[in-house]
Image (cartoon, rainbow, N blue to C red):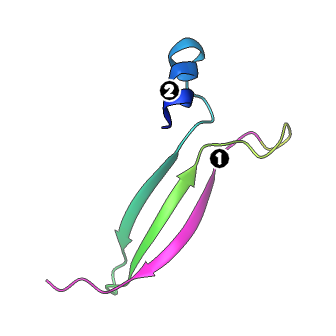
Amino acid sequence: MQPQHAQVARQRGSWGVGKFYFDVQTKDKKCFRIYYDREPKNAQDRSGHWFLLAELEEVEG
């Protein structure tokens, strides 16, 4: 979270602020980076959304 957003979040809470990133691996060993964006897109769509950011190199092991 950027400093200016953190200051506002301390006063009003952090609803709708931030992205959470995850690296996931499927059963067939494919790896992806996904993220959840908490920002609402408009007044009618106030929930966050998931996005596929990249397919990653397969992890050995």
Q: Residues within 10 Å of mark 2 (few under 14, many from 20)?
A: some
**Up-down relation of residue 46 to residue 26 (above or below):** above
Q: Position of residue 28 (x, y in %)?
A: 34, 87
- On the rendered image, what quadrant is the C terminus found in? bottom left
Element at label 2: helix
Q: Nearer the viewer, mark 2 or mark 1?
A: 2
Residue depicted at 56% across the width and 29% down the height: 5
Mark sitting on residue 48: 1
Q: Position of residue 58 (x, y in %)?
A: 30, 86
**Up-down relation of residue 35 to residue 45 (above or below):** below
Q: Position of residue 8 (x, y in %)?
A: 58, 20
Instruction: Give the magenta range.
Output: 46-61
Q: Quarter of the image holding residue 9?
A: top right
Q: Amino acid at mark 2?
A: Ala
Image side of residue 59 versus residue 49, left or right = left
Which residue is denoted by mark 2 in the rendering?
6
Residue depicted at 63% across the width and 35% down the height: 16
Residue depicted at 51% across the width and 58% down the height: 35
